[in-house]
Amino acid sequence: MKLRSKRGERIKSTSGYITILGQYEHILVAEKALGKPLPKGANVHHIDANRMNNDPRNLVVCPSKSYHWLIEMRGRAYDACGHADWAKCRYCGQYDDPKNMFIRNNPSRKAEGHPEGWHKLCSALSSRLAYKILGKVPPPGTEVLHIDGDDTNNDSCNLVICPTRAYRMLLARRIKALNVCGHVDWLRCKYCDQYDDPKNLSIKNAGCEGVHHECSKKYQREWMRNKRKSDQSRHGI
């Protein structure tokens, strides 16, 4: 993928955003609409989740990254169920009114300001499935993984008992890798979204994903160009 362009040419970056002369187009559009550079720490949100659609009507300037994530999660909830303030059950994956769910007291930083939780019945069902397979009461924190991703398929051959949620998520990632590339131990590159042998990647995020050296270099070059352009615009150069 080309990173150097002719004057005014629109180029798709490795992160999926459009750049013009080394600057992200969505930031240029937002700054033009505001009539000034973006405040420090501000993020630009794409309403339709399409990073290439930089129409001013599709952009929202967020004061911080956490607020950006809040809008993202509320948007996903609205698209899924028509209610922006509903929460997604961690077991069945369905959205519901938080009044009908057990809500976590300390949600993750990404979901700050948006409810996270689960249905009590779903939690009980997971425990019952684990009890059915183990023949005894499962230890605290035990979760059940559906191999085919279908939470309604409770056949014993489709279930895996996981000692922790982290282990369940690890198995889910490995199953996805197997389905996508045929290699259960391959990891996804953070920038190009392609799976590859970990030997060819720099491992990130506690072994959950990696980065190709070339993708990382491209991203760093783009980031430095954008930073220089942003600094110049702030100082009126």
Image (cartoon, helix red, strand yellow):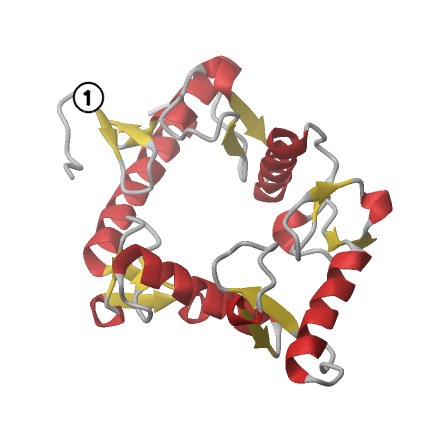
Residue 28 placement, left or right of 160: left
The amino acid at mark 1 is Glu
- The outermost residue toward the right is 99
Where in the figure is residue 218, as x and y percent of width and height? Answer: 22, 47
Q: Residue at x 66, y 83 (%)?
A: 134
SS state under label 1: loop
Rendered position, 36 above or below 170:
above
Where in the figure is residue 128, as x and y percent of width and height? Answer: 74, 71
Q: Along the line of sight, which residue is nearer the eye, 162 or 196? A: 162
Q: Residue at x 69, y 48 (%)?
A: 112
Quarter of image, res 60: top right
Where in the figure is residue 174, as x and y percent of width and height? Answer: 40, 67
Number of callouts:
1
Q: Is residue 104 visible?
A: no
Residue 129 placement, left or right of 171: right
Residue 104 placement, left or right of 151: right
Q: Along the line of sight, which residue is nearer the eye, 128 or 5? A: 128
Rendered position, 19 above or below 93:
above
The quadrant the N terminus occupies is top left
Residue denoted by label 1: 9
Q: Residue at x 74, y 47 (%)?
A: 115
Quarter of image, res 237: top left
CA neighbours of label 1 inside 10 A, class few (<14), some (14 to 19), many (20+): few
Rendered position, 226 above or below 147:
above
